[in-house]
Amino acid sequence: MSAIEDRDDIEWENGRITDQALVEMRSWLNKPRPVPHWNSEVTKDNVWHFALGVGDDNPLWWDEDYAKASPQGAITPPPTYLYSHTNGPRLQPEHGRASTEFLLPGVLGLWAGERWKWHRQVQLGEKIHATTELVEVTVNEGGQFGGRSVTQVERMPLITDTGETVAEIWHTIKRFERAATRSKSTYLDRPLAKYTDADRERFEQHYINEAKALRRGAEPRYVEDVRQGDKLGPMLKGPLTVNNIIGFLLGWGSGLNATNRMAYSLLNLHPGIRMVHPDSGVTDNYESPHWDAAYARLSGLPGGYDFGSQRFSWFAHLLTDWMGDHGALTELEFRLLKPNIINDVTWLTGEIAKVDEEAGTVVVDITATNQLDQVTARGRGTVKLPKKGR
């Protein structure tokens, strides 16, 4: 075990970005580490569970008869399903080295952005695992919350049991001292959203009509028919609830949501994840601020908040609905600009930025906007579309 893993004095409420902690962090640059998996094999049930968590009802992911008639010829996973091969329980000592808290224990980590590159579509029955490697550490002296902050980038290849890399992820996390985020109160005093009967009716009617309006399905979308400036969406996600977050975790997985005897084994194995509830005194882990308001407030937020991978998967959903069964998502990147807090809604819209008919590719800019008309994330995806007569 490393010096970090041996420590039992980590103060999660007031964790500091010290020079020594940065030395320890940088010692892991360019050293691949194993990533525990939630799913090890691509199966029909695993794919369906992930689609449920995203709210993606495309029959290509779950209906065998429909999928047989598609260009793929069988059920295939949504592009970001591969997340579920990266987020398993950290039940071994070496698994702690895949965690945020291992690299800078006690310091708040917020998902800042991500970039994916898909090399091919994965198939049912394939076994896939991942490794992660810290590739960049940038120290920022002063920022939006004041004090010192850190930007870390990790590269995570998704690899079959034959050694083929089917996708790559570059994952960016911003690290802040919780004391600084609380003192700034940038989001702490923002009221949680409330909705009227009219709002609820508007959301429900949108959901009733959304698939018909947005999902291309079996009808090919040809690259020759796409024009720069064409619009996508809007697609609705939310309001964000604890149930919404749980649904995503059931598909994506969780490295930390063990229970009872196994939960305490996990806490003792990886002390950097340990938190103590300020009201009840119950021991928990650092994933809990996502749904527990007391923990969230100690991190400078007024309530629970979504996972970055959750919002990223929503971006991919907008694109797969638009491109149809004959298209392929080859690249996607995005930046998180504001937190998506419990009760928030997210409206996803897109615009065609570039069309390359010769290559058969389309570049799409995507924006996520909440109920306050605040832009909470921006992204850009590249889609491969079929050509007419080919």
Image (cartoon, grey):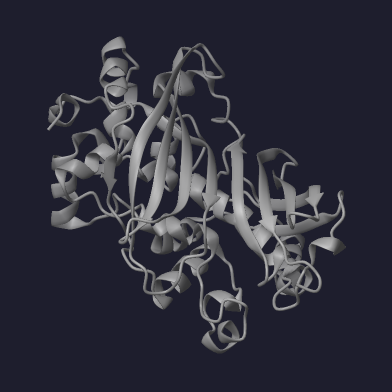
Residue 224 placement (x, y as % from top left): 85, 62
Q: How many marks?
A: 0
Residue 359 seen in the current view: yes
Residue 168 placement (x, y as % from top left): 46, 47
Q: Residue at x 79, y 51 (%)?
A: 356
To which quarter of the image does residue 128 belong?
A: bottom left
Q: Quadrant of the C terminus?
A: bottom right
Q: Quadrant of the N terminus?
A: top left
Q: Is residue 265 above or below residue 147?
A: below
Q: Residue at x 63, y 57 (%)?
A: 237
Return the residue nearer the eye: 330 or 261.
Answer: 330
Task: From the viewer's perspective, tell me whether residue 292 is left or right of residue 237.
Answer: left
Q: Residue at x 72, y 38 (%)?
A: 374
Residue 273 placement (x, y as % from top left): 26, 38
Q: Is residue 34 above or below residue 389?
A: above
To which quarter of the image does residue 18 belong?
A: top left
